[in-house]
Image (tube, rainbow, N blue to C red):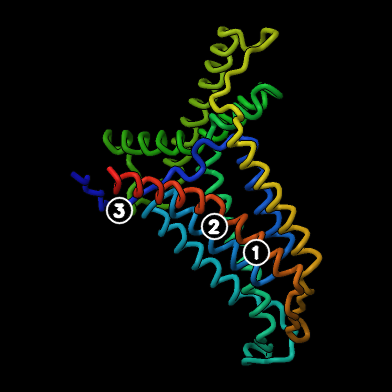
Amino acid sequence: MRAEVSTLPLAKVQLFSGWPPGLLLGYFLGIIGITIVCPYPATLAISLGFGCGCFICIKGSSAFSYLLGLAVLGIFVALLNPLFMTEGTTVLFEWGNQRPYTLEGLAWGASTAAMVCAVMVWFASFHQAFTSEACMQLFGSLTPALALLLTQVLRLIPTYRRRAAALLQARAGIGKGVGSQETLRRRIEGSSQVLGALCNEALENSIITADAMNGRGFSLQPKSHFKQIRWTLGYGVLAALVVLLFIGAACGLFLGLPGIQYVPTITLGPPSGLGYLGLLCFGLYSALPLLLVGKERVQWMYFLSKS
């Protein structure tokens, strides 16, 4: 009897689960570096498109609000750039004291906006994938104090955001809440009291954490190091594939793509054969996490259909 395949939508996917921290950090540094250093339109489109796909797979439906905010930011940056950069020969209209609003400035602003949005969406994916456990595993054996500091910093913002909400709710319960009808002075006083309480709690927790780590022998030598993920042959093959794709993308993009010029006129030549090879390698490099997850999904569906 054939088992029924579940049709429930996949809300979230563990896109980078199981990746060694060193490989994970190198992958994100590579794709963010190429996006910043090589702002070619095709490169930006590939990076932004696959970056949004990875972030949606990681966050699920909750990613669309963040992407909508990025889209609004990108449109704002693109439309704002010609207001300050008035060079260009194609004048769309004039505003103010006969200041030209040029097509070249708009294209330059759109390129900058696409690069900023692509970098931000990859950083958002990195923030979700590179957890405090991965940070401790990567830097714990090299610089234990730095690893502990980074771990505390990574958990600082979400922890104290929840603590601030709890303090505001507690103050509202005893009649000291700051409503929208209060004056600006009362709002500043209430917010400063909450901020002071958070600072006092942070200092107390830092002392408690330091004493706890010393009590557990953190300052003793030699140190033992726990590794949750160990390198295997499969991870070695994956790392080799990432390195080869990065080298192919970097060499092809930097040697085969023509220069792009926005002022005084937009000048953009076609890529050479090496440039197309670089775009292909960069596309595969950007889509590698999605391809790996898609392969696993296809295998899983195949096995379920055979059961």
Residue 185 visible in image:
no
| Above-or-below relation of 157 to 298 | above
Residue 103 in the image, given as x and y percentages of width and height: 65, 86
- Which residue does the image show at 70% across and 57% down from the upper left? 34
Query: Disc 3 residue type?
Result: Pro
Dot label at residue 9: 3
- Depth check, front residue: 176 or 289: 289
Residue 151 in the image, given as x and y percentages of width and height: 57, 29
User: In this rendering, which labeled residue sits more in front, label 1 or label 2?
Assistant: 1
Query: Disc 1 residue type?
Result: Leu
Q: Residue furthest left?
A: 1
Residue 90 visible in image:
yes
Is label 1 in a helix, a strand or a loop? helix
| Above-or-below relation of 175 to 180 | above
Name the residue tied to disc 1. 280
Q: Residue furthest right?
A: 255
Bin the neighbour count of mark 3 within 10 Å (Cα to Cα): few under 14, some 14-19, many 20 and up.
Answer: few
Q: Report whether 63 appears left or right of 272.
A: left
Name the residue tied to disc 2. 51
Question: Counting residues from the N terminus, which is met first, the one under dot 1 or under dot 2?
Answer: 2
- Which residue does the image show at 64% across and 64% down from the upper left? 115
